[in-house]
Image: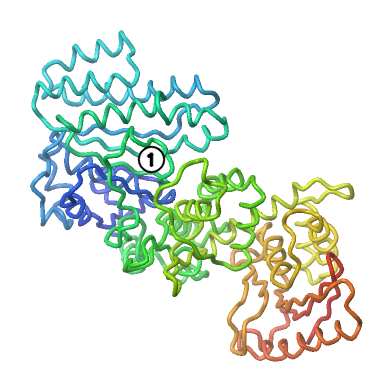
Amino acid sequence: MPKKLPYGISNFARIIEQNYVYVDKTRYIELLENENNPTQFLVRPRRFGKSLFLSVLENYYDLNRKDKFESLFGNLYIGKNPTPEQGGYLIMRFDFSGLDTDSREEFKESFWRRVQERVIDFLEGYRNILPNAERDIGRIVKEKPGVDALDVAFTSTRSAGVPIFVIIDEYDHFANNLIALGKTYKDEVQAGGTVRKFYEILKAETNSMLRRIFITGITPMMANDLTSGFNISTDYSLFPKYNEIFGFTMEEVEWIMAEAGIDRNLIKVDMEAYYNGYMFSERGKDKVYNSQMIFYLFDQVLQFGKQPDQIVDANLKTDYGRLRRLTETPGNREKLLEIMLNGSTTTYIVEKFSLEELNREEYFTSLLFYLGMLTVGGTTDFGETKLIIPNYSIKTLYWEYITSYIIDIPDDGESASMSKLTETVINLANGDMKPYLGYFAESILKRLSNRDLQRFDEKYVKAMMLATLFVNGLYLPVSEDENINGYTDIYLQKHPAKRNIKYEYVFEVKYVKTDATKEEIAVKFAEAEAQMEKYMKDARFAGRDDIKFAALVFKGKGDVEAREFN
């Protein structure tokens, strides 16, 4: 009988006990326990399975769950290779997602309330071990000590003589919202702030009963801003041996499909191109899939017998919506455009950086790496890291950002409209290129002519086309599609889940300056025709009457001439 998919489930015990698929990551428990520093820090982009791994740690090390070790872990690596500290801790777990960040005061109250709630849960869960648990719970409820509730719990455990393991999930979840409030972020994270005090209390207790800490989140930025308040952890995020701790390798994805009974024939897109490609260390062994992306795809296939209409899970799109907030400075927007145009950049990944440094290129680029918008793609001869866009799904997020930016640019003429753009792409699907090309030239390129996103050449125009052709989901535009006789500039491929799309397109894009002569334009068309003749011989296109081949010559900042080839 096929196992169920744990899409959206991060409770390890539930996954094992209710016959869900679980990819065995328990070998990393052994690695982490053998590290010299028991205060550990490891970040990854959202939706990579971090919360599930923390649930694994909780179930493995919890003294109260020691009797469930065999039933939960017996068939896994760690069940056959248990470590000395298994079942030896009281677990205190925190999750800082979902806090109120509307104002500084509301955030402070929300933060200390979350700490109190988790401390009370801790004391209630270990009444059988902590003799003063009932008294200490009453004290917290009555006095509402905020983050000082930690001290109450630590005092209680010292009398029992049992070590504590603190697990912190989403340690920086609230950071971006606090940044938007301006000074609030610095006030709360640096000296004297509520967040800083929380970590100072943890740091002090590591000299007593707090023996292990594991912290995870998205970026190392907040950890660095805590400075001396919490300078005792080791960051394992870029260590090669932890490259595959979160996410799934290709081998693991194949195993999931077999365990869950996924019919591969129902998946029309190239899974590797769309969902794989993440590397978090230059010396990592395997690329990994984002676990949320792959479970989303498989869940849709099981639920509806076909792949989803939307390539990217809407939950992931929401997470990456923060990209816009991070590109408020012209320099960062230019860098983002450069990455979108080239598909890559080179830098030295910065392991520690602060909020104030995000306007510097290497820090902003490193932040994109930690967010999962870029990933390791090799090194240069000079030792710099080459960062690349990991897959097609993430590339579409860049396109969506650029399109929304363009649409929002104020203009004295006719304002750009997403609905109007969509209308022209529908015309394109029905075989009429003119409405799209006219709208693209007039309302997209000319809008950018006097803005900070302007560098007109073939690559620039092609990138803007890709962005605007993706937005309504009718097509899956492919840049530099490999052809038997070269690389097409743009292959406008039908979305496999969409019906009634009459035509696909192959575009060859050329660019000339405003003062180009008719002869120069003719030369460009001749070049494009020669390339088109080669592309049309590709077996995928031979004998088809539902595909159009067109050369597009853009002149200056908005004029375009198109010619079709048969």
Is the residue 208 above or below the residue 143 in the image? Answer: below
Q: Residue at x 34, y 53 (%)?
A: 237
Secondary structure under tag 1 reads helix
Q: Which residue is drawn at 73% across and 79% down?
A: 508
Please provide percent x and percent y for residue 139. Answer: 25, 10
Amino acid found under the numbered disc labelled 1: Ala
Please provide percent x and percent y for residue 277. Answer: 44, 66
Q: Which residue is drawn at 20% across and 26% down?
A: 125
Q: Which of 333 and 97 is in front in this view?
A: 333
Q: Residue furthest front?
A: 382
| Quarter placement of the N terminus | bottom left
Please provide percent x and percent y for residue 83. Answer: 10, 50
Please provide percent x and percent y for residue 64. Answer: 14, 33
Q: Nearer the viewer, residue 128 or 268?
A: 128
Is the residue 72 above or below the residue 308 in the image? Answer: above
Name the quadrant containing residue 103. Answer: top right
Q: Residue furthest top?
A: 142
Residue under circle 1? 223
